[in-house]
Amino acid sequence: MVCKYCRRIIDSNYQFCPYCGERVILETKSIKQTKPDLIGSNNTEANRFFTILLLIFVFPFGLFYMWLTRPFTKRTRWIISLAFIITSLLGFIMLIIGTSLPSYQG
């Protein structure tokens, strides 16, 4: 069986794809049709590396790219998204508190 979202071959007993975390939709293809997809799936590690670089250096675009290309499981994507959102909010709160102190002379 082939996952509709990440196009990898998975066992038909799975309810969720072990690669992308999406719910499995019964869509079967012959091995001949899925072979080009398998060749392209070698690019997954490069895609994960590129996504991590985007998350580190340009995190808003990295979050968008991560959800668009789905290089991680759904649970991992949510954890990364929440971690970046919480970190950003804490940074803004610290910025507001720091600049509102009487000792700030900016």
Image: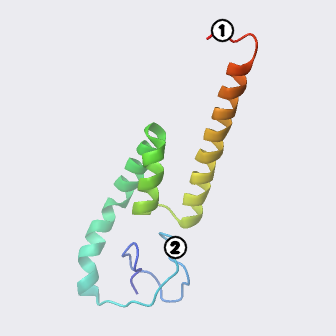
Instruction: Out of 23 and 100, give the one closest to the viewer.
Output: 100
Quarter of the picture containing the C terminus is top right
Residue 74 x/y as whole percent: 55, 66
Q: Residues within 10 Å of mark 1 (few under 14, many from 20)?
A: few
Q: Position of residue 95 (x, y in %)?
A: 65, 27
Which residue type does callout 1 highlight?
Answer: Gln
Q: CA distance from mark 2 to mark 1?
A: 53 Å
> Could you tell me which secondary element the residue under label 2 belongs to?
loop
Residue 46 in percent (x, y) is at 35, 53
In the rendered view, does 49 fall on the left or right side of 79?
A: left
Badge 2: residue crowd in 10 Å (few <14, some 14–19, many ≥20): some
Q: Is residue 7 left or right of residue 83?
A: left
- 27 horizontally vs 74: left or right: left
Q: Is residue 76 above or below residue 93?
A: below
Do the CB atoms of the residues marked 2 and 1 lie less than 8 Å apart?
no
Report the residue marked by disc 2.
Answer: 18
Viewer-side residue, 36 vs 93: 93
> Which residue is identified by label 1?
105
Dot 1: element: loop
102 over 53 or under it: above or below: above
